[in-house]
């Protein structure tokens, strides 16, 4: 498959990327390309220009402090999965990164690319939302609760570039997903995070966009055990129904994955 | 159109190509390196896996322009001085291929896998093969081949260290 014609530019710095992006109305950033290139090959996307930011060293870093892990937007999935800092501070985040796609995809795909695309079945949005992370761009900081606005849509404006994501280190966290047997995308993925402020539960794959399961959060804030989730289901009315599973089935999967995520967090 | 310069199997290469040329077409159609296969062309089957700067990637989901300046290794670049790479040797001896279509990608994935995880068990090998599909369903012997290759390379490394 061959995409529509476009011109390729490799940005040499963040400023360069900003300038290139400002010059063209329908230019797109290429961060890892593991979703974008596939969409371009299917001719579902037709940017006139691709601005490659995957090689920008200033966006490819992982920094740890006592309270946060900061991951650069161009950090690749395998780098997050293998980072000693991430493994030590937020092991669930490393495990999540290691569960995306396959090894070859993880060598290319980036955190920033995944978030900007906001695929309804992507894994990273669940971690960002549950860990109450902050998405930093070339213009501002955006709280996780305000970042994901709908299916394949985010709070990012034209010309805005994600530069890094700051993940507060939780007391405990866990992620569990039920992958579609063929595509391996999450049919339901649940990330739970417990901090001094309470528990946050984020669900991906099951609906049109990642969302928080507030009833589960309240129950887990009282008792952080899988048993606390007994009888709690998310509203199937809000979930996807397709050939892979009904909304009711997905609602049940969300409860099951939430239980597994809590169990993982308690390990 | 732009000139893309990179290193392929140890040799410098400079060729003009369209910006939309995927790395796999660049390798196959422009350089004649047809050992890298196109299977699904949708990033799922792994027949097109090559190494870019030492890491396994799917060359159907990367533009040639992205590889400018990089060091690319294809299946043609694994054997050295007429001697097969230990992973190729292990695939031959363990009957790790049937029709052979997926084999180049399987071998490139296996070399990368052993580099990252020198000591491998069968369950890990199967997990790591998530992105490679064998339509003959010959996974059993593919797993045996990789297990055998990892053991040989481990023994070789110990031999060299000693």
Image (tube, grey):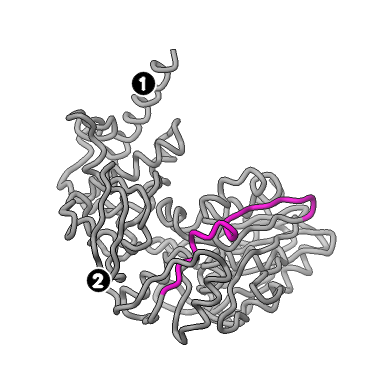
Give the residue at x 66% y 64%. A165
The quadrant of the rendering that contains the N terminus of chain B is: bottom left
Q: Secondary structure at mark 2?
A: loop
Chain to which mark 1 belongs: B
Depicted B98 relative to depicted A109: above or below: above
Give the residue at x 22% y 59%. B38
Magenta span has A64?
A: yes
Give the residue at x 39% y 17%. B160
Q: Which residues are magenta?
A: A50-67
Depicted A49 relative to depicted B74: above or below: below
Chain to which mark 2 belongs: A
Magenta span has A52?
A: yes
Q: Between residues A57 and A97, which one lies in front from this camera angle?
A: A57
Depicted B100 relative to depicted B37: above or below: above
Q: Between residues A244 and B25, which one lies in front from this camera angle?
A: B25
Circle 1 is placed at which residue position?
A: B156
Task: Establish whether labels 1 and 2 are both on one chain.
Answer: no
Cα separation, mark 1 vs mark 2, equals 42 Å
Left or right: residue A232 versus residue B57 is right
The quadrant of the rendering that contains the C terminus of chain B is: top left
- Residue B20: horizontal and vertical position, in percent? 30, 71
The answer to whether marks 1 and 2 mark residues whose Cβ atoms lie closer than 8 Å is no
Numbered mark located on residue A95 in the image: none
Give the residue at x 75% y 59%. A168
Numbered mark located on residue A1 in the image: 2
- Residue A233: horizontal and vertical position, in percent? 65, 72
Left or right: residue A87 versus residue B96 is right
- Label 2: how many Cα within 10 Å (few below 14, some 14–19, many 20+): some
Q: Secondary structure at mark 1?
A: helix
């Amino acid at each position: 498959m061959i995409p529509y014609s476009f011109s390729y530019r490799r940005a040499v710095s963040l400023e360069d990327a900003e300038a290139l992006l400002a010059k063209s109305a329908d230019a797109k950033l290429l961060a890892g390309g593991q979703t974008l290139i596939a969409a371009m090959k299917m001719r579902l996307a037709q940017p006139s220009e691709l601005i490659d930011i995957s090689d920008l060293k200033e966006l490819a870093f992982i920094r740890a402090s006592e309270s946060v892990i900061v991951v650069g937007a161009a950090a690749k999935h395998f780098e997050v999965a293998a980072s000693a800092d991430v493994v030590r501070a937020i092991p669930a985040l490393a495990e999540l990164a290691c569960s995306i796609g396959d090894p070859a995809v993880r060598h290319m795909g980036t955190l920033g690319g995944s978030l900007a695309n906001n695929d309804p079945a992507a894994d990273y949005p669940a971690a960002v939302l549950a860990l109450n992370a902050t998405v930093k761009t070339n213009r501002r900081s955006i709280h996780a609760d305000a970042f994901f606005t709908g299916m394949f849509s985010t709070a990012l404006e034209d010309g805005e570039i994600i530069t890094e994501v700051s993940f507060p280190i939780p007391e405990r966290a866990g992620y569990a997903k039920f992958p579609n047997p063929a595509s391996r995308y999450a049919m339901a993925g649940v990330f739970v995070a417990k901090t001094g402020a309470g528990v946050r539960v984020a669900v991906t794959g099951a609906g049109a966009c990642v969302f928080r399961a507030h009833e589960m959060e309240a129950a887990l804030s009282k008792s952080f055990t899988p048993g606390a989730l007994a009888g709690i289901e998310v509203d199937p009315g809000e979930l996807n129904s397709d050939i892979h599973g009904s909304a009711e089935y997905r609602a049940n999967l969300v409860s099951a994955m939430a239980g597994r995520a809590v169990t993982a967090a308690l390990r | 159109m732009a000139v893309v310069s990179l290193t392929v199997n140890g040799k410098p290469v400079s060729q003009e190509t369209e910006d939309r040329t995927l790395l796999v077409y660049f390798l196959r159609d422009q350089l004649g390196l047809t050992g890298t296969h196109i299977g699904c062309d949708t990033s799922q089957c792994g027949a097109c896996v090559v190494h870019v700067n030492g890491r396994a990637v799917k060359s159907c989901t990367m533009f040639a322009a992205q590889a400018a300046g990089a060091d690319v290794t294809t299946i043609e670049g694994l054997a050295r001085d007429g001697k097969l790479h230990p992973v190729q040797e292990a695939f031959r001896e363990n009957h790790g291929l049937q029709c052979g279509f997926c084999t180049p990608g399987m071998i490139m994935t296996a070399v990368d896998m052993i580099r990252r995880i020198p000591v491998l068990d069968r369950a890990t090998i199967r997990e790591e093969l998530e992105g490679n599909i064998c339509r003959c369903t010959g996974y059993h012997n593919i797993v045996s081949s990789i297990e055998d290759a990892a053991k040989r390379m481990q023994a070789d490394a110990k031999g060299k260290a000693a």
